[in-house]
Image: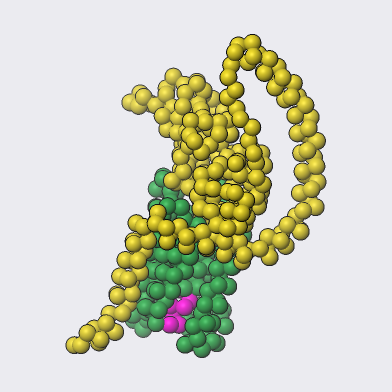
Chain colours: A green, B yellow
Amino acid sequence: MFLSFNKNNLASILFLGIFFILLQLSIPKLFFINGFEIGFDFLLIFLTILLFSYENYKIILLAFVFGLIQDYIVSVEQIGIISFIKSFSIFLLGIIKKYQFIWSKSVKFFVIFLIGFFHFSVYYFFIFNEPYFFIFYISIIHSFLYFILIFIINRFFFNSKLI
Amino acid sequence: MSLERKLKKNKNIISIILASFFSLLIFFSYETDYSKKAESYLVDLVGIFYYPQKWYKNILSVKEENIILSQKLVQFSLLNSKLENYKQENENLREMLNFKESYKYLSLLPANIVNNNFSLYAKSSIINVGKINQITNNLSVIDENGNLVGKTIRIGEKNSKIQLLSDNNFSVSVKVGKSIAQFKPTFGKYGILEGVLKTALIDKDDIIYTSGISEIYPSDIPIAKIVSFTKNNTNMFQKVDVEILVDLNNLYYVFVIQ
């Protein structure tokens, strides 16, 4: 589905970007833990998929823009945090592309999981006062969900050829 | 190697440096007019995008909500008549004791929650009232049960952003027994009370109310209930954990106190 559009077609990316923003706005969370919502970060998933189809620097800048939109909509006095974390996570994910033909699939997916964990734990570190165990716990769940969805998309939409 | 080739070779590094630089710049210039305008504009834009879904949801839920609200109306009517008696009694007693009026009548503006799903963690929400409804910054927001939800922080033309009381920058002065303490959220639906003296008589399930000291929040708005408290010999204050009363995950209607 994602590979079908022209690689130079910026309009398609923007259209899909808006679609994923709306998806993020509309889809309810999966479940709750201690009143805490657990759900998918569709924008990060979308950016991860784009990263493996386009040049890194374009997606880093796109991650910055999407992160900034998210920042302005949800953040309170911490505008800029999500844009930084999103663009930095995409930059780190770009390392996988560098070792595309060296690392095995399992190593690549493990690195994706670790970067997902980095993304969520840094984010929650900024927005929670305490406790650190809870940040770790929630970040693990979120990065696991992120990993699962990336794995499924890679397996079923791209026939395991994306990553 | 020419500069152009160097730039091309290191374009990933340059883009992340640029992204980080602008993120930090925006982070430190949060209070500038440009930043505020961009935020207000995006808050309005989300309202426009979300309107069809809100309309659709309203149609689906309106019947069920009507039944619940009708039941609540009867319950509150009964309660109100009881409270009217208490009010009369209280006014007579205040008059006898020569008390001054301490409680002003509040004007409530109803609003719909446009969205609070965009983040993985609810720390702000967008409501469908704005400048055209005479909304300003720093107005208290409560839910249909009168529990504190947060305060308005950024106002668009037709929509506004509210800071929820689960946001880690949120803090409000509260009454604990006869003393004053500070409520701060920790994670999820939990928070702590800072500055509760060991001598303060508190119990599990006690409701914590706003103190009214702040200019933003009127007094006596319920915020949280005590879930646990511990006294430590090395500390002059009690460690009090509280649970936020408002259900932030199922918030559809709120009232802005004007």
Residue drawn 33% across the image and 26% down it: B234
Quadrant of the rendered image containing residue A103: bottom left
Q: Is residue A49 magenta?
A: yes
Residue B174: where, in percent of width, then height? 50, 31
Residue A74: where, in percent of width, then height? 50, 57
Residue drawn 39% across the image and 82% down it: A55
Query: Going by the picture, which residue comes out furthest to the top?
Result: B96
- Please determine whether, in this image, residue B128 is positioned above or below residue A150: above
- Please determine whether, in this image, residue B80 is positioned above or below residue B250: above
Q: Is residue B91 magenta?
A: no
Highlighted range, magenta: A48-54
Whether residue A157 is visible here, answered yes or no, is: yes
**Along the viewing direction, whichever of A121 and B1 lies nearer the viewer:** B1
Residue drawn 72% across the image and 62% down it: B56
Quadrant in the picture for the N terminus of chain A? bottom right
- Please determine whether, in this image, residue B16 is positioned above or below residue B91: below
